[in-house]
Amino acid sequence: MSIQLTDIVKSFKTDRVLDSLSLGVSRGETLVLFGPSGAGKTVLLRLIAGVIDPDEGRIVINGVDMEGVEPEERGIGMAFQNFALFPHMDAHANIASPLTARRRTRADIEDRVNEVAELLKIRHVLGHKPKELSNGQKQRTALGRALAAEPSILLLDDPLRNVDAKLRFEMRLELPRLLKAQEATVIYVTQDYKEAMALGDRIAVMGAHGIAQVGTPEDIYLTPADTTIARLFGDPAINLLDVVPEQGGGGPEIQLSGARMPLDTAYAGVVGRPCILGIRPETIRFTEAGAPGVIPVEIEAETPLNEKTVTLAATRAGREILISRPAGTPGPDRGTAHIAIDPSGALLFDQATGKRIHPGESA
């Protein structure tokens, strides 16, 4: 089923949480809602589910306007942060409850509950009631209940928040496969950018009162709409340096540590405009002195992080730069070093607004 939200407004007293929000989710798509706490992600799920009503705007599911349609009539599976488990039922009965309501056979129910419990690693607690479960087990039980009924639409509110790191990693691999197999339309809330990148066909980044950017994980990472979004995605974080592009002999360029770094010629229109240069740490490499565009830096610290090594360096003006390279790759750990930056990977943002400057844009 498809979901279409048009000009949604929702306020609580004087606090306007969502302001003229519009968003579409295609049939069978997994859309991740990503953003900080308080951005309105859970509110948006509750509006779609029918738990609360919008002040303004339309919610259309599979071509049908949901105004006046009760939650139980919307054909939606939900797993919210507060678990909402039946306290008098054990985990097995909680997961089975939507199947029992549909009068599925006992054999079908057993097969489905065991399948979901195996995926979520909770078969050993199926006989336990909610008060006997840890928060992580409660969360997985709530997720299992949502998955068991194989609904056409799934609303998942940070369902792996209380899960340990190992299982969380495994679920990032398994959940997409399961959701695709069910052909469900999914809206998945998370504050973990790695989870958003792993699970989403598209990501909707929520900002103040609405959607700040929608795109594929690659779009969001490589072409963030502003510096705020650029900072949210990536570990280590993107380097953001104040610069003013100049006109060089071969096109636009900037100066770092007294060296000239060329920019893509498509940025010729922003020469003289105060900008912020965005450079992902993994796009910077150590190199030998003397090559064109090489920038001298001083190594301040080096930190091994399992699969990568992160180096903190400083330009001659004292501006810090993070450099990331695969673990085991040789690189300097002290003293003066030289780096090269691929101009095609450099981003420019307007210094006043933080908005990304598109290639070809003029000052």
Image (cartoon, rainbow, N blue to C red):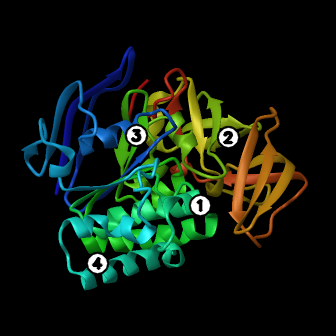
Q: Marks 4 and 2: CB-CB under 8 Å?
A: no
Q: Tell me the residue at 37%/16% (across/down).
A: 13
Q: What's the CA distance linking mark 4 and mark 2?
A: 67 Å
Q: Nearer the viewer, mark 4 or mark 3?
A: 4
- Residues 205 and 65: in front is 65
Which residue in the protein does label 1 denote?
Answer: 134
Mark 4 — residue? 109
Closer to the camera: disc 1 or disc 2?
A: 1
Q: Position of residue 282 (x, y in %)?
A: 63, 57
> Element under label 3?
helix
> What separation in Å lies between label 1 and label 2 (alpha carbons)?
57 Å
Total numbered labels: 4
Task: Give the spatial CA distance, label 4 vs label 3.
Answer: 32 Å
Which residue is identified by label 2? 260
| Residue at 70% in and 63% down | 325
Q: Secondary structure at mark 4?
A: helix
Q: Earlier in the sequence, mark 4 or mark 2?
A: 4
Q: In the image, what residue type sits under mark 2?
A: Arg
Q: Residue beneath label 3, please?
A: 41
Identify whether 195 is placed above or below 51. below
> Compared with residue 205, is residue 11 higher up or lower down, i.e. above or below?
above
Mark 3 to mark 2 CA distance (whole Å)? 44 Å
Label 4 vs label 2, nearer the camera: 4
Question: Residue at 46% across / 52% down in the picture?
Answer: 158
